[in-house]
Structure formats: structure tokens, C-alpha cells
């Protein structure tokens, strides 16, 4: 009898330890703002610095043509604003739902820890109705929290318009369905032993879903970085021509050349780190650790891009000053 009771206690403690490791705080909370946070995977993908020195299209034909272009731009801007408003409203709803389930999860965890302490103090039978209900509620709230988080990630991916987002969205949706099934199993469970089976299944589903999320978010960001770097390389070539023209015109461009060389170096470094990340994403039998390493490479790539953009703004400013000075000089000469 005593041996049987010890086995029951060990089984219950196994459930408790597994549950407590199921949803670590860093697993959801940080990625939600994150990466995942996420939530905006394109926050560093701004192209305003590129556009500020691009050649503009020539629309100086007839006044009617100008009017048509302006009207078309106005309609396009209105549609974009509507899409942005819809996206913001959707993001707000997901965030509110996520916070609700997070709070519910924390409350259930607190109650569950109290039950655990009572079981350890031999004040409560681990298979009592009270202990069983506390375990079921904690597990249910954990699954709800997971589903809310994955739904948030799924929505972000669907809105990113990446080349491979469709298959990732489908994969995450399948994991959500599996979690829904396990939630039903929790409700139907009548013993700690049955709940332990659910816990192990949920852990496998969550690990797989997290891997899909990390991989999908990383590949989307990598794709956006690739687009940005391609434009940056083209811009670098144009800037080199511009600096060369200034130098031939007698302008001291030594400092400008140094900044341009640093800019090119940062872009090259960002490209190398992106390729390192891509090699991990495309590897066989990729682990969660591989995904985290790849995502770290992308963070470093984004950091290089931010430094490059800072130099780019300085280069644009100096080029503008040179052009203004040269323009004033030409006017005085005329």
C-alpha cells in the first residue's frame, strides 16, 4: 500500500514538473513582442532612406496626365490606409486575446502551485477531485495560451506576403488543431495518469509548432533582408558614380569615400550573415537550436543594416550640401 502511494506521488510530481516546463515564461512572452515577435517582422525593413535619393519618374507631360496620376496615387493611398487600419484592428484583437489567456494561465499556475505544495505536505491526495481539477484547469489554460500565441504568429505570417508563408501558415494551423484535440482530452480525463499522457503529447506538439514558428518568421525576415540588400547594392554602385563625379569636379571627397566604404562593408557583412542563416534554414533535420542560431544571424544582419542606414543618411546629407554649394557656385558664375 505504501509502495502504491509512493508511485502515485511520483506520478503526480512528474506531471507537475512537466507542466511547469511546458510553458516557460521566455518561451511565449518574449517571442510575442519579438519575434515573433514578433510582432512586426518588418520593423527594420524601412525603405525610406533608399527612396530619399532615388531618381523620380518624369510625369511632366500634359496637365490632364498629372491629374490622372494624382488621382490614382490618392486612391492607392486610401486603399493602403484602409488595409493598415484593418491590420491594426486585427492586431489589437489578437493582442487582447493573448493577454487574456496569459492572465488566465498565470492565475491557473498560481492555483496549481498551491495544490502542489499541499500534495508535498501530504495534506492532499494527488488523485483527489480538487487536485485533478486544478491540474486540468492549469493544463487547459496552458493550451489556450499556446493556441492564442500560435494564432498571433499565424496572422503575422499571413500578412507578411512572403514566398513560403502559405505552407507555414497551414503547418501552424495543423498544430493548433492538434492542440484543440488535446484540450478535449483534458476535459475528458479522469485521472492524473491520463493527464500525463496529454502533457507529453502537448509538449511534442508545442515543440514542433515553436520550431515551425521560428523557421517561418526567420525565413520571412531573411526574404525581406534579401530584397533590401539587393536595393542597397544597386544604390552603392550609384553612389560610387556620384562620388566619382564630385571628385572629378574638384570636390574633396575623402571623408565621403570613407563613409561609402564603411557603408558597403556593413552591407556585405549583412549579406554574409543572411547566407549563414539561410544555410541553417535549408538544412536537413534542423533542430530548434539551429533555428535560434539562424535567427541570431538575422539579428546581426539587421544590426549591420541599421548601421549602414545611419551612414547612408549622413552620405545623403553631405551629397545634398555638395550639390547645393555647386549649384550656388554655378549661379554666381553665370
Image: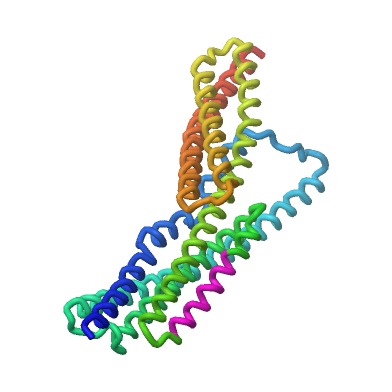
Residue 177 image-quadrant placement: bottom right
Q: Position of residue 210 (x, y in %)?
A: 49, 60
Residue 86 visible in this rendered orientation of the protein? yes
- Along the line of sight, which residue is nearer the eye, 130 or 248? 130
Q: Please tell me which residue is depicted at 40% across the width and 57% down the height of the picture.
A: 30
Q: Residue at x 44, y 60 (%)?
A: 32
Query: From this viewpoint, is residue 100 visible?
Result: no
Q: Nearer the viewer, residue 328 or 294?
A: 294
Determine if the magenta segment contains residue 306: no
Q: Quadrant of residue 173?
A: bottom right
Give the tally of numbered discs.
0
In which quadrant will I find the C terminus?
Answer: top right
Q: In front: 95, or 163?
A: 163
Position above or below: 72 against 249: below
Residue under the point 60% across and 40% down = 228
Query: In the visual, does 183 lie left or right of 225?
Result: left
Q: Is residue 179 within the magenta segment?
A: yes
Can you give x and y, in whole percent of width and height, for residue 68 in the image?
Answer: 78, 51
Residue 298 placement (x, y as % from top left):
50, 43
Say which residue appears at 60% left-offset and 59% top-offset. 168
Q: Tell me if residue 253 comes above or below residue 292 in the rendering.
A: above
> 277 or 252, which lies in front?
277
Give left or right: position of 130 versus 44: left
Q: Quadrant of the N terminus?
A: bottom left
Residue 118 lies, in percent from the top left, at 20, 80
Horizontal arrangement in the rendering, residue 213 relative to residue 331 (left or right): left
Q: Which residues are magenta?
A: 172-187
Q: Against 90, is 182 above or below?
A: below
Amino acid at each position: 500500500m505504501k509502495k502504491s502511494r509512493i508511485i502515485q506521488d511520483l506520478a503526480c510530481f512528474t506531471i507537475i514538473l512537466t507542466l511547469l516546463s511546458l510553458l516557460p515564461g521566455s518561451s511565449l512572452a518574449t517571442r510575442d513582442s519579438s519575434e515573433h515577435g514578433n510582432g512586426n517582422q518588418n520593423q527594420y525593413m524601412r525603405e525610406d532612406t533608399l527612396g530619399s535619393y532615388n531618381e523620380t519618374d518624369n510625369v511632366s507631360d500634359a496637365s490632364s496626365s498629372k491629374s490622372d496620376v494624382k488621382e490614382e496615387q490618392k486612391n492607392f493611398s486610401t486603399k493602403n490606409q484602409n488595409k493598415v487600419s484593418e491590420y491594426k484592428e486585427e492586431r489589437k484583437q489578437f493582442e487582447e486575446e493573448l493577454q487574456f489567456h496569459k492572465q488566465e494561465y498565470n492565475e491557473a499556475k498560481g492555483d496549481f502551485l498551491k495544490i502542489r505544495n499541499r500534495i508535498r505536505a501530504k495534506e492532499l491526495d494527488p488523485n483527489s477531485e480538487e487536485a485533478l481539477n486544478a491540474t486540468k484547469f492549469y493544463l487547459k489554460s496552458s493550451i489556450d495560451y499556446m493556441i492564442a500565441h500560435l494564432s498571433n504568429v499565424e496572422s503575422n505570417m499571413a500578412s507578411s506576403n512572403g514566398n513560403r508563408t502559405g505552407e507555414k501558415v497551414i503547418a501552424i494551423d495543423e498544430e493548433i488543431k492538434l492542440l484543440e484535440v488535446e484540450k478535449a482530452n483534458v476535459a475528458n480525463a479522469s485521472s492524473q495518469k491520463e493527464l500525463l499522457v496529454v502533457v507529453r503529447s502537448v509538449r511534442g506538439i508545442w515543440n514542433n509548432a515553436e520550431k515551425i514558428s521560428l523557421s517561418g518568421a526567420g525565413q520571412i525576415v531573411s526574404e525581406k533582408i534579401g530584397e533590401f540588400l539587393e536595393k542597397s547594392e544597386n544604390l552603392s554602385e550609384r553612389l560610387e558614380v556620384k562620388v566619382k563625379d564630385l571628385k572629378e569636379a574638384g570636390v574633396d571627397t575623402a571623408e565621403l569615400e570613407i563613409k561609402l566604404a564603411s557603408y558597403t562593408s556593413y552591407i556585405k557583412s549583412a549579406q554574409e550573415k543572411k547566407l549563414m542563416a539561410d544555410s541553417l534554414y535549408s538544412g536537413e533535420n534542423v533542430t530548434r537550436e539551429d533555428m535560434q542560431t539562424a535567427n541570431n544571424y538575422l539579428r546581426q544582419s539587421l544590426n549591420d543594416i541599421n548601421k549602414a542606414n545611419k551612414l547612408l543618411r549622413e552620405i545623403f546629407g553631405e551629397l545634398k550640401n555638395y550639390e547645393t554649394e555647386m549649384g550656388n557656385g554655378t549661379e554666381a558664375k553665370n
